[in-house]
Image (cartoon, grey):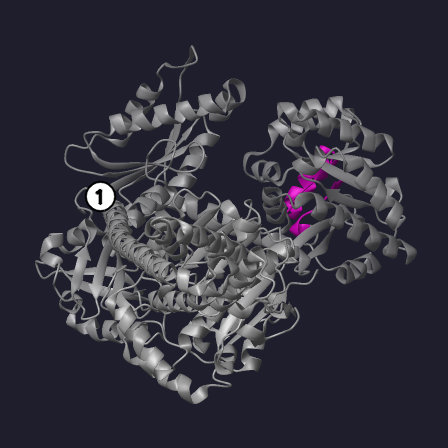
Amino acid sequence: MAQREWVPLDVDVSVPSMARTYDFMLGGAHNFAVDREVGERIERAMPGLRNAARVNRAFLGRVVRFMADQGIRQFLDIGSGIPTVANVHEVAQARDPECRVVYVDRDPVAVAHSELILAGNDRAAVLHADMRDPEGILSSPEVRGLIDLDQPVGLLMLLMLHWVPDESDPVGLMARYCAALAPGSHLAITHVSGDHQGEKLSEATDVIKRSNSPDQVTLRTHAQVTALFAGLELVEPGLVGCGEWRPRGPGDIAGEPGMNMLVYAGVGRKPSA
Amino acid sequence: MPDMPELTNREPDGTPERPDPDRARAALARKWAYLLSGVVVLPLTSHDLGQELRGLLDALCAALLAEPPTRAAEEVGERLAALGYLGEAGLRCTTEVLGKGLLALPEFQPVERFAARVLVGMGALTTGYLAADRRALLAQQEHMHLTLLKAVRDAKWHLKESEARFAEVSTLSANGIMIVGLDGRLIQANAAIGEILDYSPAELTGTSLYDLVHPDSAASLREGVLALLDGKRDRIRQSQSLLRKDGEVARISLTASVLPGADNRPSHLVAVVEDGTELMLLQGELRRQALHDVLTGLPNRQFFGTHLESVLRRVDPAYGITLFQLDIDAFGLVCHSLGRRAGERLLVHVAQQLRAVLADETAMVARFDGDEFGVVLENSATTPAVETIVAAINRELAGPFYVDGVGLSAVASVGVVHRPSGDLDPAELLRAADAALRRAKNGRRGQWELFHPDQDARDRRAAALAVGMPGAFEQGEISVRYRPVVHLADGTVAGVEALLRWDRPDADPVPHDACLDLAERTGLTLPLGEWLLRVAGGQVQWWRQRGFDVPLAVGITAYQAADADLVSRVVRVLGDTGLLPNQVVLGVPVRALAVPEAAENLTVLHDMGIGTALDDFDFGPDAMAAVEDLPVCCVRVASRVVRRQATTGGAVVGALLPIVLGAGATVIVDGVATDTEAAWWRAAGASTATGEHFGSACPPGDILARFASD
């Protein structure tokens, strides 16, 4: 909390935001020229990346429906970015209007955007916080108001953890999140990996590096991403290419096989104590 | 509802020979949905998308048959765009699928007839789609502008809020608070730091922190700040010297930490300054509380002692000082009868009166413990005499002073040390005043007593000895000596008297009477007296077993005589030693018999068959009464009576002695020093005597030799 009040929140649209760039890749217009410029350069460095974005977005819909089918009615989406189309609350509340969703992002623009979108939806809220403060997030009024931590939670970290460098100890952070969740909770992670597209990807990450964006990518291997699920049971089919995780239709997989493997996706379930 | 497994669906082959319009449309809609979902993101399940697109296809088909087809087809395009982010990819996919598929549908056969309609209809769909897409795009951009505005406003609000909080916290804070840039310049400073340094906060803004720090300590601050910026330390705390505007040094305690920016790198430092002078004020208050009596507000003993010390250093030797120590008589009685609160109010009253009496003098009035007060008076040419001051104090205290409707009159006993010599330190002076007060209290209430150095020295020595005595007893420094009691008729041994002797290392031995006086001061008498009887009893038994059967005389003190356990102690010793009652004579001082318990004890001992003696017998009225009233077998004439007889002739004693003998008591004479004295007492009717003339107190072995020589 102290940090939230002390950090000068400069909203600088001359610096690209990965959240807005992602929106652009999905075809949205919730972005600025700098975001689109970076998005186009990334696309040039790695043709077909739009499809990877689309496949990840399709995974979101799938995984939220999967969790809802497991009985989960409350979702915490950390690193929610600019909720553009097919948002968690749209998908979840379409399944059951009682579903409650809290979005968390550290980008003030993403937060402001979400607040505008969610105005009037009393079962969804957005919290401005840094994912590296699990206790602060879980004890925030937004989370406490909508989410009962004694009941299973659907925790979503989609295209999020590769923005967290190793120095921030993402494994430790995930352990702190999972410790606070009730048995039966599910964690979904999608994470960019260089395991299959290393060379092309490094060009794309160079674009991001040169863009002065505060968001920088840490690529992780299959084993490193699996480690983020410590203490959880991975549900079938385990940690796989995003398009290979329980696809239900042509929209769930990309035409280019490489794009299906660019992002790992997995879902872990917290076992009973 | 589970999704339909489109992946396993196979598009059924349409057979032109047997057209089924509904089936064909369903197939086209499925194909459209299938291909569209592969290129765009839609918030719909495959099944729902299929349903949606089937609805759109039906509407489009209806439009193509309407006249003109354009408006309704545009609406379809608008609805399509509204499904989500379709973009160019979605439109491309749609035109490809529908462009071919529509003309293959049974209702649009023959193709030639419907080609133009379908072409125009697709154009209208595209037009509607573009218009809707552009509206969506503009809406999103508008939304984004709102978002941006809101984000900026929120950020400003957060900033304003945090600034407001900073302002509030920093205004209220008694500590100095500074927000410092990484270049060391002050960005914000609160009023408190301004006060500490005597600058206005505006003057401080922009100043370098290092310019405010004393040059000697700037290096350590730089070092600390570096450690903060390098992330080696989360917080530094230093004792620092800041420079005030006037160049004076302000001793402060500085705590600094880093404020991280949005990128989590250090953006500012916050430094909190605790004012050492404020701390000193607080310490001053604590000191005041520590040095003053809470009840009366007067300085306490500690403060008084310190003050006395400084007074002694600066005193005008022509007049000197006078030290008073006062004790409120009957204070205990007031507390006991009227309650503690009344006692407290009495003390407050006394404090006020003392201050009032001494208002014109250079004096400090202090409250010591309980009901004791102290006054140190710096004398001057106009200072009244001591007795005048004491009289004034007691006149004021005489009141009456009312507590809960009860009029009280206080009287003080006062010990005074007047113009002491300069070589006494404060502690000695206070003790001297206390000693004088004790003596005053021993006299009539409301007395005052001047301190007399000679008397005090004796008292002190005695007190020091008394305090050391129990330890000496434990260490075995106290022993039992024996003195022969001899027949005046023939000089043979009639018995032995047991006496105490304290052999102090490197000092004169303390004789029996002094030992008893000292023991009476500390309460050592009871164990020591019992021990004396026990040791001597054992010794006498030992002698008896060797054929020397002599009775034992032991004197007891006034305290022992009145002891409720005296009889049981004696019985216990007799039982332990095997001593027979008739072998023991216990002597009780005459003056001790004023206490009824002592007389009772004496009677009981006599009834047990133990010999009872009246010690320190002086033929005074009390002594004569005792010998007549109490069952005593003998009296021991006090040695001072023997001295007087030796110098004045002893007519009175000579006249009274027959009365004693007539009461049935034998007479022992103490302290006979010469043959003449012995002869006189023998003639007067005394039977036995002790004294230097017959042998002094000696160790048991020497007495045995004396027995043997008889």
Question: Which quarter of the rendering shows the C terminus of chain B?
Answer: bottom right
Is B469 situated above or below A178?
A: above
Residue A255 picture location, percent across and down: 49, 77
Hey, which residue is sitting farthest top in the picture? B405
Observer able to see residue B44: no
Residue at the spot 13% in from the left edge and 68% down from the top edge: B211
Relative vertical location of residue B596 with respect to residue B199 in this rendering, above or below: above
The chain holding disc 1 is B
Q: Under tag 1, what secondary structure?
A: loop
**Pick the front one: B197 or A139:** A139
A186 sits left or right of A123 in the view: right
What span is colored magenta in the figure? B667-693
Is B688 colored magenta in this rendering?
yes
Image location of residue B646, percent across then percent down = 58, 39
Please tell me in which quadrant of the rendered image residue B300 appears.
top left
Q: Is residue A145 magenta?
A: no
Whether residue B183 is visible, yes or no, is yes
